[in-house]
Amino acid sequence: MAKFCTNCGKELKNGEVCDCKKNKKEEEEAVVAVPVESTNGNASDMFNEVVSDVKGIFKKPIDTIKDNCDEKKFVKGIILNVILAVASGLFTLAVLDLVISSISSLFGGYGYMMDGGSYSTDYDAFEVFIKSAGFSLALTFVYTGLLYLVNTVMFKGKGTFKQMYSLFGVSSIVETCGYLLSALLVKVELTKWAICFWPLLAGSLLSMVYKYHMIKFIGPKDENKHGYIYLLTYALYIAAVVIILKVLN
């Protein structure tokens, strides 16, 4: 009389023991092991890509921007924009500290009298940093959303929101460097304000140039429209920033 495995139903010969449970256990262990290895690899690959983009944006900026015109780079775009936000927060703290130091030196203390009342220069550094960084990060989504509206919806470009956000992140690397270098100079050269802000100004202007070039990879085929897409996006972006600031105040 034929015998069958009670677990998988396989027909067994006399004295044969089914190994389905052993195979199933090995498969489960393999499935569990793969994500761990994959996660570590992805983290390492992501770090290497970010470092490569930082180098590339200075050596071959246009090629680097082109390489990031991919929805698969969206997570890296988020990382780059978070780093931009952190740099913005650090710069804000450095400038605020400089302003308060200047006020304190003028009025001889950490507080001074104004209109008959006491005005304190004390502030919560962590709160200032979080608000500044959070506002900067929010603006990356605002700009990308407006670019998608103008480029893809109005001018029938081919770019997706994820592609644009990835491109925004890589094109803002120079601005991030500008923030960090200016923050460092503010702490070192307290009396030379002009020198302190030059790196940020240069980085911001260069970032704007790169944001124009990225339209080449996501915009409509008619390049005559690219300039209008860029200008209209920035005009709407500035208007949005002004409105947001008024609402927050």
Image (cartoon, rainbow, N blue to C red):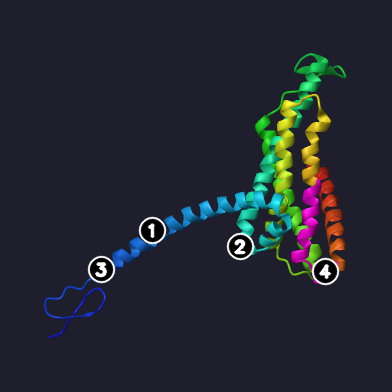
SS for dot 4: loop
**C-alpha separation, residue under disc 3 versus residue under disc 1:** 18 Å
Identity of the residue furthest to the front in this view? 59
Relative placement, left or right, of 40 versus 200 is: left
Q: Label 1 crowding class (10 Å Cα cut-off): few <14, some 14-19, many 20+?
A: few
In 3D space, how far apart are the residues under numbered discs 3 and 2 (Cα atoms)?
39 Å
Q: Tell me the tag on residue 72.
A: 2
Q: Quadrant of residue 167?
A: bottom right
Residue in the image at 84% along x and 71% along y: 222
The percent position of residue 160, horizontal first and vertical second, equals 70, 65
Instruction: Kindly identify which residue carries mark 4.
Output: 155
Which residue is the site of mark 1?
33
> Magenta region: which residues?
205-223
Of 205 and 110, the residue lying toward us: 205
Residue 118 in magenta?
A: no
Q: Amino acid at mark 4?
A: Phe
| Mark 1 vs mark 4, CA separation in Å | 48 Å
**Extreme residue in the top direction:** 108
Q: Which residue type does callout 1 highlight?
A: Ala
Residue beneath the point at 80% across and 32% down:
195
Residue 132 visible, this orientation: no
| Image location of residue 166, percent across then percent down | 67, 57
Nearer mark to the viewer, of 2 and 4: 2
- Which amino acid type corresponds to the residue marked 2 in the rendered image? Lys
The numbered mark at residue 21 is: 3
Mark 1 secondary-structure assignment: helix
